[in-house]
Amino acid sequence: MQSPTRKKILEIFTNKQNEFVSGEELAKLLGCSRTAVWKHIEELRKEGFQLEALRKKGYRIIDTKDRVSENEIQLGLKTKKLGCTIYYVESIDSTQKLAHSLVQDGCPEGTIVVAEEQLNGRGRLARTWFSPKYSGIWMSVILRPTLPPKMSPQFTLIAAIAVVQAIAENTTLHPEIKWPNDILINGKKVSGILTELQADSDKVHAIIIGIGINVNQKQFPDELKQIATSLFIESGKETKRSHLIQAILEKIETYYQIYMEKGFAPLKLLWESYAVSIGKDIIAHTLNGDIIGKAIGITDEGVLKLEDQDEKVHLIYSADIEI
Ligand code: BTN
């Protein structure tokens, strides 16, 4: 976790915008020695912040490498709870795995785990999730709602709304949701959500929402080229990952609060407005076989409604959807 002094230094630089701040002024504002200031500046440099130092003028931030460190995420983050505790790692097998052990150690609600790279990222249905270094968002968000476990799939839908809106706000793109957990752009997958649980038979201890977003990848391995895309490939522009994370956390917090106060019903229309499959003929590959029909919407609980050619409505709780 980050030093509060370095957080304060970043706040000072942010308030001063592009101006230089002298070592003396920093020392005064922070209540420490100029040598201590210099040490903190060196630490920030190691973290990827590019700081210019000029004799007689002091320091200023020129630019930051695109990193998703605790400082980068928390600077300007407007949430009450989400992201207040951040575990940031350069490389990890899976952020979900670390999140599960943090839950067992009693971490607070809103804790997030973010990695620059995952070596064994997990997808739905025991698939792997390609998570190369410095190019995507590989994040797990821990919530601790007081709810029965059967409500947990709705959190995938809440997170999907947040991801779609955050992407739309930070790029020129208009992603769509493919029920239950895929975010698509031009028919290719740009993001996936994996919601996992720690629960008793009647009570949730924690919901861990794993979010993977392909942000700045310039290309994909051959086996993924046809099905995966990134925000960069679709827009031709790099997106600052920490800003996208901030927007996602802010939106999840807002919709989580609405959900806990009023249930899923008020979010249903919003979700449907982003859904690519609604109104279309689809095939639902379920564990009990394929069901072909028209996706006519979701229930107030977030379950997909599929109408077959005999006008029978099937409720789909879990499936792979083919459009
Ligand atoms: C899917 O579409 O199958 C879900 C993909 C979820 C990937 C994310 S990346 C962060 C988190 N950690 C993981 O190991 N998986 C999720």
Image (tube, rainbow, N blue to C red):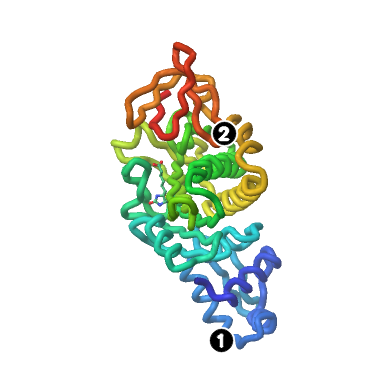
In the image, farthest residue toward the top: 310
Which secondary structure, mark 1? helix
Question: Which residue does the image show at 47% across and 27% down from the upper left?
Answer: 315
Question: Which residue does the image show at 42% across and 57% down from the upper left?
Answer: 116
Identify the disc placed on residue 174. Answer: 2
Counting from the top left corner in percent of width and height, residue 293 is at 44, 18
Q: Nearer the viewer, residue 238 or 122?
A: 122
Work out how far the residue at label 1 is from the one at label 2, CA to CA, in angstroms. Answer: 49 Å
Which secondary structure, mark 2? loop
Counting from the top left corner in percent of width and height, residue 268 is at 61, 34
Which residue is denoted by mark 1 in the rendering? 35
- Tell me the quarter of the image containing the C terminus: top left
Q: Nearer the viewer, residue 39 or 1?
A: 1
Q: Nearer the viewer, residue 323 or 118?
A: 323
Asked if residue 217 is positioned above or below residue 61 in the image, the reply reads: above
Q: Residues within 10 Å of mark 1 (few under 14, many from 20)?
A: few
Residue 283 appears in the picture as rendered: yes
Mark 2, ligand 1, within 8 Å: the answer is: no
Q: Earlier in the sequence, mark 1 or mark 2?
A: 1
Identify the disc placed on residue 187. Answer: none
Three-letter residue code for mark 2:
His
Question: Which residue does the image show at 36% across and 60% down from the upper left?
Answer: 92
Asked if residue 164 is positioned above or below residue 72 in the image, the reply reads: above
Counting from the top left corner in percent of width and height, residue 185 is at 49, 33
Three-letter residue code for mark 1:
Thr
Q: Nearer the viewer, residue 207 or 70?
A: 207
Residue 63 appears in the picture as rendered: no
In the image, farthest residue toward the left: 223
Counting from the top left corner in percent of width and height, residue 233 is at 45, 38
Query: Nearer the observer, disc 1 or disc 2?
Result: 2
